[in-house]
Amino acid sequence: MTDTLTDRLAPYAAVAAELGVDAVALVPGPNFTRAVEHSFMSHERPFVLVIPADGAPAALVPNLELGSWAQVGFDGAVFDWRDQTGYSDAFSGMMDHLKISSVGVEGQVMRVFVHHALKQAQPDLRIVDAEREISALRMIKTEKDVAALQLAIRISERALHRTLDTVKIGQSEKDIEQTLIQMLFAEGADDLSFAPIVAAGDNSAMPHAHARDDYAVKAGDALLIDFGAYKDGFAADITRTVFLGHVSDEGREVYDTVLKANLAGLDVTRAGVTAHEIDDAVISVLENSPYGDRIRTKTGHGLGRSVHEAPYIMRGNHMTLPAGTVYTNEPGLYQLGNFGVRIEDDVLITQDGYKLLTHFPKELMVLPC
């Protein structure tokens, strides 16, 4: 990514031209932040940046954000509005100024009321879902992006080491979760990538479990921790599963199977591989094991400014992955009522292979607690 705002907006203008629409519209979220290099909240006040395929951009900005918007260095037309008067006139003014008849929007981010406000201002406006094309601009990470991701990951790994050192039999999952959160901020996180998943025993068999305050962890439990620090605009996403006190033969076999699947995904990773090929390599290991009936998820997803973004690592997605793509390799096996195991790494695709951004040990770990 180049340094000037004009240069950062140019790829969005190119997307509009490629799609045959007059402009692209961004709203607060990861694409907006990438474009202007400032973060703005998404709330009840509409905030829209419109980038034409040809011509100067324009922005609709809540009046209370004008001071912050001035720091962006935006030199296009700005249409501000106040809570007391509403935003309809600002939308009308912006559309009259732009003179466009079609716009590509972020289908997974733009909210319905913003869509309606655009149509109310210009009823004949053609609105196209350009989510895939807009978000694809974030898929190839710059050196600066990768450095931010590595920092978020290092913070996360230090926090996990410190947290595991405190785990004791009899604690609740909530106790462990709170320690993890404290350690993340103590190590320098700006925020959490997402609410951590801390799940022990039978709870670990639910991929998106919530920590319980009424379950005391016990010897022999699998303890699954899925979490990440958010730092400098980028999100880490790591999962490790450990066992408390001792591990059963079944637990060891399941863990070894998941680890083999994780490594199989890495073996095929290089520039030019498809998301389908990575997932197929991973899932085939799980399917060919005695535990194939415990598969519940795909291999992973892209990672960057959002904790889930393109590409999605799953069979049927034949998108070719270029060097600079970062994805999560997170195979798992889950048996409801028993336990689950997931091992998740953050992986940078390179021209000749991959660079593992996570360094937390993956060998089976049994905590002496």
Image: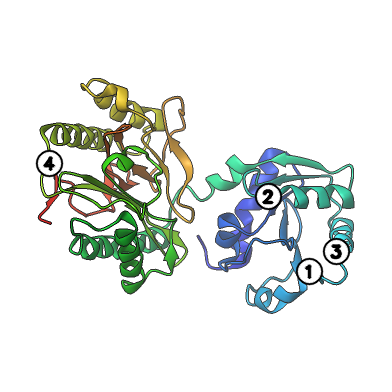
Disc 2 residue type (three-letter): Met
Disc 1 residue type (three-letter): Val
Residue placed under numbered mark 3 in the picture: 90
In this orientation, does residue 38 appear?
yes
Q: Is residue 219 left or right of residue 261?
A: left
Q: Nearer the viewer, residue 166 or 218?
A: 218
Disc 2, disc 3: CB below 8 Å? no
349, above or below 31, in the image = above
Tell me the SS state at disc 3: helix
Tell me the SS state at disc 2: loop
Structural distance between the alpha carbons of marks 2 and 4: 47 Å
Q: Nearer the viewer, mark 1 or mark 3?
A: 3
Picture quadrant where residue 69 is located: bottom right
Mark before the other along the chain sequence, 2 or 3: 3
Residue placed under numbered mark 2 in the picture: 110
Q: Residues within 10 Å of mark 4 (few under 14, many from 20)?
A: some
